Structures are given as C-alpha cells and as structure tokens.
Image (cartoon, rainbow, N blue to C red):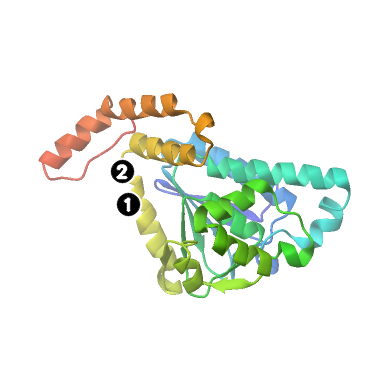
C-alpha cells in the first residue's frame, strides 16, 4: 500500500477498511482507490475474514466524493479521465461482487463517489447526522450507467431522479425512508453496533452467505446473463457441506453452531 490515507484493520472475523483523508472529509484520490483495491484483495484472501466493513475516519464523513484538489492532475486530460474512471469502476464493481458480506458504516457526509461507494455495499448503517447527495449536476460531471442503475435498483427511479436531478442533500431520516440506509444508530453507539452486527453475520455459515450473496448479485443482471447453474451448484454445496451437518446438530443440541466454511 502506498498511502497512509487508507487504513486496514482485522478485528477477529471482521475486516475494516477506513478512508483516512480527514482534512478533505475523506475525499478520495486515485492513490486511495488503488490502496483500497489492495486492502480488499487482502481481506478476500484471508479465510478468517468473513465480513467487511467500510467506513471513514474523523467523525465527519464516510466519503465526501472525489478529491477535487486532484482533478487537474488526475482528471483534466481526456486520457486521464478515462484511466481514472476505469480505476474507480474496478473498485466499485469489485466491492459489489465481493463474495463476503459488506457493510458501509456512515457517520457524516456520504456524497457523490461516497454515495456510489456505499451503494456497492450490501448494507448501509448511518448516524442521525449523516447526509447523502449526488452533486454531479452541479459540477457538470457525467455519471456512469452502472452507478445510476445501482441507485435506481436501491431506492427506485422516482427517489433516484429526485436526488440526482436536484443535486440536493438528504438527511438520515429521508435516506432511511427511501431505503438508502437500513439502520440509523446514535453516533456514540454506531461503531459498537456495527461491529456487533457484523460479528453476528460472521457467526453464520460462510458457504450459505456466499451463496446468498451470489444469488443477490444475479438478480441485478439481465435474465440471460444470470449464472443460475453456478448458483444451483453453490446451493447444492451448502447441503453437502460439513457446516450443514454442524448447523443441524447445533440446532438439535440447542447450542451455537461452529461453522468452518466447508
């Protein structure tokens, strides 16, 4: 990793990736996207990590979008824009298709690229002070198809167009109302709640979680592109696994299951 603006931590079965550009409300530069990809690859290669949490440092922002101070060096020339978009797309798509559950822990601004990043996560949990927005229309930026589709898939076309066309910010209550976030938790309890919640997910059967995540991803694809045979093989694998035996046994013995992911 080449920057101290991205932090990686492993807390038992939970991998935590933190955007650490506090002076700019965790605005993201190209080097940060590169480092994020490296961190996520490490989490995916570690079988002990079962859930991944993304968050922002400083208590004021999750991610406030792209680092505008870097636009002249990273997004001015046409070739530079193309490269930047390719890199960010790789990270967004990589997070969306991770086989492990992902949670966005949001405390403060979640704007532009930060909103897009949060939508790549499976679950979003925020504090009451969090604010969400898509300022592309105020900046003259183009917004990629996949990011628009992800927003519409999450909150529906009406709410998505309201946020996108107006470029306004919405508060945590509005975000929860339209389904942008799943939970709102008091700021002082946010981190402990998310860690406990992630820990409860991590205790579940890894093969089942992987199959559920894969199934969810297939629903976002065109029917002709869905890998349903592969999904069925994963479902069959769950029933043939040692974890299925352990789950049944633990249920009958009225004890927590000890899943091994095999």
Is residue 146 rendered to the left or right of residue 123?
right
Height in image: 197 above or below 251?
Answer: below
Image quadrant containing the N terminus:
top right
Question: Which residue is drawn at the image coordinates 70% and 67% (left, top)?
Answer: 24
Q: Is residue 19 visible?
A: no
Q: Image quarter for residue 241?
A: top left
Q: Residue furthest left?
A: 253
Tell which of 94 and 54 is nearer to you.
Answer: 94
Image quadrant containing the C terminus:
top left
Tell which of 176 and 260 is nearer to you.
Answer: 176
Tell which of 56 and 150 is nearer to you.
Answer: 150
Residue 23 position within the rendered picture, expressed as x and y whole percent measured from the top left: 69, 68
Q: Cα distance, mark 2 to mark 1?
A: 7 Å
Residue 31 position within the rendered picture, expressed as x and y whole percent measured from the top left: 72, 49
Q: Image quarter for residue 252?
A: top left
Q: Is residue 213 visible?
A: yes
Question: Which residue is drawn at the image coordinates 66% and 61% (left, top)?
Answer: 112
Q: Secondary structure at mark 2?
A: loop
Residue 65 position within the rendered picture, expressed as x and y whole percent measured from the top left: 68, 61
Q: Residue furthest right?
A: 77
Judging by the rendered image, the residue that carries numbered circle 1 is 200
Height in image: 227 above or below 55?
Answer: above
Q: Image quarter for residue 37?
A: top right
Is residue 214 rendered to the left or right of residue 146?
left
Judging by the rendered image, the residue that carries numbered circle 2 is 204
User: Marks 1 and 2: in contact by CB < 8 Å?
Assistant: yes
């Amino acid at each position: 990793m080449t920057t101290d603006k991205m932090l990686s931590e492993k807390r038992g079965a939970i991998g935590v990736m933190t955007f650490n550009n506090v002076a700019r409300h965790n605005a993201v530069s190209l080097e940060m996207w590169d480092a994020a990809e490296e961190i996520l690859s490490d989490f995916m290669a570690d079988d002990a990590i079962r859930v991944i949490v993304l968050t922002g440092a400083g208590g004021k922002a999750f991610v406030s979008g792209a680092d505008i101070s870097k636009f002249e060096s990273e997004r001015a020339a046409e070739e530079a824009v193309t490269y930047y978009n390719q890199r960010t797309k790789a990270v967004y798509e990589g997070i969306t298709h991770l086989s492990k559950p992902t949670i966005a822990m949001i405390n403060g601004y979640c704007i532009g690229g930060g909103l897009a990043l949060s939508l790549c996560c499976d679950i979003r949990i925020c504090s009451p002070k969090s604010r969400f927005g898509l300022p592309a229309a105020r900046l003259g930026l183009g917004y990629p198809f996949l990011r628009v589709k992800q927003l519409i898939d999450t909150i529906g076309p009406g709410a998505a167009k309201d946020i996108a066309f107006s470029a306004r910010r919405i508060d945590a209550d509005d975000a929860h109302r339209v389904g942008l976030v799943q939970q709102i938790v008091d700021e002082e309890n946010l981190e402990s709640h998310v860690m406990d919640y992630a820990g409860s997910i991590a205790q579940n059967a890894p093969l089942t979680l992987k199959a559920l995540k894969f199934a969810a991803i297939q629903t976002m694809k065109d029917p002709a592109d869905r890998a349903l045979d592969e999904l069925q093989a994963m479902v069959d694998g769950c029933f043939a696994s040692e974890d299925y035996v352990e789950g049944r046994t633990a249920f009958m013995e009225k004890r927590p299951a000890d899943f091994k992911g095999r």
